[in-house]
């Protein structure tokens, strides 16, 4: 279960019925020849009809005006299509099991500009002899072609992500098996699809939250919102992304965050305020107090526990008989007298 926007959501997905269900994103089209990546978890069986997973652009403006990740009729493999041409994968993804799918277009590559990934593995790559010219006036849809009411997806879709950058295989693999934090560089829209009660009565729950931080919600159309075939349903169970928030105290007056490669801000817990200039992984001070660090990495933020920092070694103190306390014993006020 994840908590955000003051609502508790489960690890759900959307079950599309293949007839008229669609999810319309308010995100802008990644226009012209700009690089992009679309990815999602899907679960479906074989079908004789084409099925669009994520689509953007505008039909009717000629070849190259649409960019689609889909399954073609009578096939079992993933396809990336630009309208008038495409590239097919090789892995069967219609066996009613969960598969992570991703389609990448890298405008900066000299060759193999198009890549398909299935479960984090490179499934196919190549070039398509039709330039991408997706117009900003187009639309972004999930589960159907962006106009024309064709290619309705029949199955479940979860964790739909749209990026305006070409992601590498390593980047896809690093985040495909967990929900990610926002913001992320290049993450245009992100639909966890965790709303509703799985296979329950979800009348009125027609908005999918955009968790990218860009506020591009998506709207459900024609879903029955009850039962198990046109509704919020059980999704791919993915843990939330976590980061190491532990710290160590290797020597007197020094605290170290165990996570490398993050941004850091150390706080004085007793004063409940940040320590000015303390933005490194290692924090040293001569002031005894309780300290914590707030860490940010890959869009995730975490806070350590407050840890006592003792900058002075107690063996340096030698009061001998120079302190007196009176009255002793007492259950009231006591006086402490020092020589200085």
Image: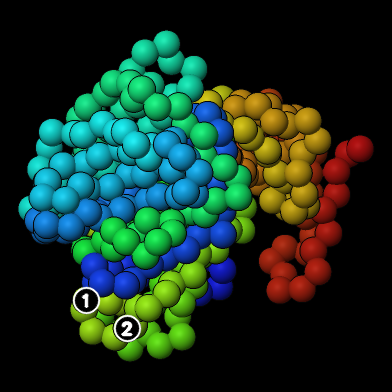
Q: Is residue 66 left or right of residue 234?
A: right
Q: Is residue 230 above or below residue 140?
A: below
Q: Residue at x 10, y 43 (%)?
A: 92
Secondary structure beneath dot 1 equals loop
Residue 105 rendering spot, x and y as whole percentages: 41, 29
Report whether residue 107 is seen.
yes
Q: Which residue is mark 1?
A: 229
- Count neighbours of disc 2 (C-alpha within 10 A) and say few if under 14, some if 14 to 19, many if 20 or more: some
Q: Dividing the image into 4 quarters, which one contains the C terminus?
A: top right
Q: Residue at x 45, y 50 (%)?
A: 59
**Front-lying residue, 158 or 144:** 144
Residue reaching furthest to the top: 110
Which disc number belongs to residue 224? 2
Which disc number belongs to residue 199? none
Quarter-of-image position of residue 174: top left
Quarter-of-image position of residue 238: bottom left
Residue 250 rendering spot, x and y as whole percentages: 52, 26
**Front-lying residue, 140 or 266:** 140
Q: Is residue 268 left or right of residue 255?
A: right
Residue 107 rendering spot, x and y as whole percentages: 48, 22
Q: Which numbered disc flags the more N-terminal residue, 1 or 2?
A: 2
């Amino acid at each position: 279960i994840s908590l955000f926007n003051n609502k508790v959501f489960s690890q759900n997905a959307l079950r599309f019925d293949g007839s008229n269900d669609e999810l319309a994103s308010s995100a802008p089209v990644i226009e012209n020849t700009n690089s992009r990546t679309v990815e999602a978890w899907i679960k479906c069986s074989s079908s004789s009809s084409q099925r669009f997973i994520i689509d953007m652009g505008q039909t009717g403006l000629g070849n190259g005006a649409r960019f689609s990740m889909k399954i073609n009729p009578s096939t079992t493999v993933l396809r990336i299509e630009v309208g008038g041409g495409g590239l097919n994968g090789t892995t069967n993804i219609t066996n009613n099991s969960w598969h992570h799918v991703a389609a990448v277009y890298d405008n900066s590559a000299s060759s193999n500009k198009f890549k398909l990934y299935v479960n984090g593995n490179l499934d196919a790559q190549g070039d398509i002899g039709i330039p991408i010219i997706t117009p900003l006036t187009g639309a972004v849809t999930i589960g159907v072609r962006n106009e024309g009411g064709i290619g309705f997806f029949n199955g479940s879709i979860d964790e739909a992500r749209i990026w305006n950058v070409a992601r590498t295989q390593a980047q896809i693999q690093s985040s495909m098996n967990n929900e990610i934090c926002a913001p992320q560089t290049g993450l245009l829209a992100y639909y966890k699809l965790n709303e509703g009660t799985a296979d329950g009565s979800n009348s009125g729950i027609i908005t999918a939250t955009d968790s990218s931080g860009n506020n591009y919600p998506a709207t459900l159309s024609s879903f029955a919102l009850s039962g198990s075939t046109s509704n919020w349903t059980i999704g791919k169970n993915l843990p939330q992304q976590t980061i190491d928030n532990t710290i160590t105290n290797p020597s007197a007056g020094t605290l170290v965050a165990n996570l490398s490669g993050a941004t850091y801000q150390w706080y004085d817990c007793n004063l409940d305020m940040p320590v000015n200039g303390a933005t490194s992984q290692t924090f040293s001070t001569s002031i005894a107090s309780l300290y914590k660090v707030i860490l940010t990495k890959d869009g995730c933020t975490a806070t350590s526990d407050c840890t006592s920092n003792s900058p002075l070694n107690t063996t340096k103190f030698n009061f001998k008989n120079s302190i007196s306390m009176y009255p002793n014993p007492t259950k009231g006020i006591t006086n402490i007298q020092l020589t200085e």
